[in-house]
Image: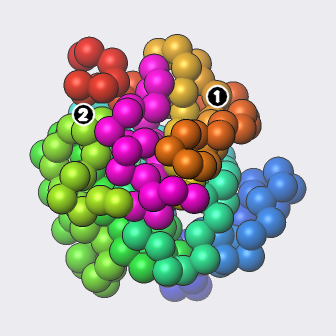
């Protein structure tokens, strides 16, 4: 069997055993997770584990999130296809690629230049022309590209940064792990008349969101 067929089989298995049984229902999200080649977003030495049910190291003490966490956060964004999305925490670029399958335009910010550059090259190599990776402090958002229909923070925030709430359109959705440094709850906030109406979802553990409106180092 060709190597690519093998990875395709592992992706299908990941969806059938990790995502569907845990309640991921959005067919567009499931299709994106079946399509994006996660093994190309992890370091070579752990490629064999790319489709395992866990987060994996990607360098700079950072991680690519567990597939289920990517799926649940993406599903909570309720993307229909025409949105402009901001992701804070590019990491490997995998979540950005999944978003790129489901939205019109994706801006993703990473504080480590080395990770951002590697992610940008990967996304270009894979043909994602609607995903833009930039370096910076994502807690401040991306003022010159705002407002956004949806925002996703893929690092643990002590609270949702005010600049991100300001850069979200009214009616827009923001999804983020919020809480303590080593344990958080996934929050979905819908902006209504300038205020976030929040729903609490699954407990989770993310690496910290470090920046002006996040943790301080
Ligand atoms: N979404 C990523 C992926 O698909 O690989 C995984 C994200 S990883 C769990 C969290 C990332 O957030 C790390 O790469 C970290 O460097 C980044 N990060 C933390 N604070 C940040 C900030 N203020 N601005 C931008 N990125 C930040």
Q: Which residues are magenta?
A: 148-171
Q: Secondary structure at mark 1?
A: strand
Q: Is residue 169 above or below residue 190?
A: below
Badge 1: few (under 14), some or many (20 or more) residues near its Cα, within 10 Å?
some
Name the image quarter holding residue 130. Answer: bottom left
Asked which colour scheme the image uses, the reply is rainbow
Circle on res. 98: none
- Disc with the residue nearer the chain's start (1 vs 2): 2
Give the alpha-carbon distance from disc 1 to disc 2, as whole Å.
24 Å
Q: Horizontal placement of 104 versus 171: left or right? A: left
Q: Quadrant of the N terminus?
A: bottom right
The residue mark sitting in front, 1 or 2, is: 1
Circle on res. 60: 2
Let me know if residue 114 appears in the view: no
Q: Secondary structure at mark 2?
A: loop
Residue 134, image x, y percentages: 18, 56
Q: Quadrant of ligand 1?
A: top left
Which residue is at 80% across, 66% downward? Answer: 25
Name the image quarter holding residue 175. Answer: top right
Badge 2: few (under 14), some or many (20 or more) residues near its Cα, within 10 Å?
few
Q: Is residue 30 above or below residue 142?
A: below
Q: Quadrant of the C terminus?
A: top left
161 within the magenta span: yes
Residue 39, image x, y percentages: 45, 63
Which residue is at 60% across, 49% downward? Answer: 192
Of 163 and 80, nearer the camera is: 163
Q: Horizontal placement of 19 versus 64: left or right? A: right
Q: Classify mark 2 as within 8 Å of ligand 1 or not, answering yes or no.
A: yes
> What residue sits right under mark 1 in the picture?
185
Which residue is at 75% across, 54% downward? Answer: 18
Let me know if residue 64 appears in the view: yes
């Amino acid at each position: 069997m060709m190597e690519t067929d093998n990875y395709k089989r592992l992706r299908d298995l990941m969806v059938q055993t990790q995502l569907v049984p845990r309640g991921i229902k959005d067919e567009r999200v499931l299709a994106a997770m079946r399509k994006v080649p996660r093994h190309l977003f992890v370091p070579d030495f752990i490629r064999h584990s790319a489709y395992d049910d866990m987060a994996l190291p990607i360098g700079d003490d950072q991680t690519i999130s567990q597939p289920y966490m990517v799926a649940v956060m993406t599903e909570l964004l309720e993307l229909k296809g025409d949105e402009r999305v901001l992701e804070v925490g590019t990491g490997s670029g995998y979540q950005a690629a999944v978003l790129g399958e489901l939205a019109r335009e994706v801006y993703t910010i990473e504080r480590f230049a080395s990770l951002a550059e590697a992610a940008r090259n990967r996304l270009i190599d894979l043909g994602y022309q609607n995903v833009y990776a930039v370096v910076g402090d994502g807690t401040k958002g991306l003022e010159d590209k705002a407002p956004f229909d949806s925002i996703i923070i893929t690092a643990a925030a002590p609270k949702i940064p005010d600049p991100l709430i300001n850069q979200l359109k009214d009616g827009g959705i923001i999804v983020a792990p919020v809480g303590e440094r080593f344990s958080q709850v996934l929050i979905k906030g819908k902006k209504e008349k300038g205020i976030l109406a929040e729903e609490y979802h699954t407990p989770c553990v993310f690496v910290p969101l470090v920046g002006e409106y996040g943790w301080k180092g």
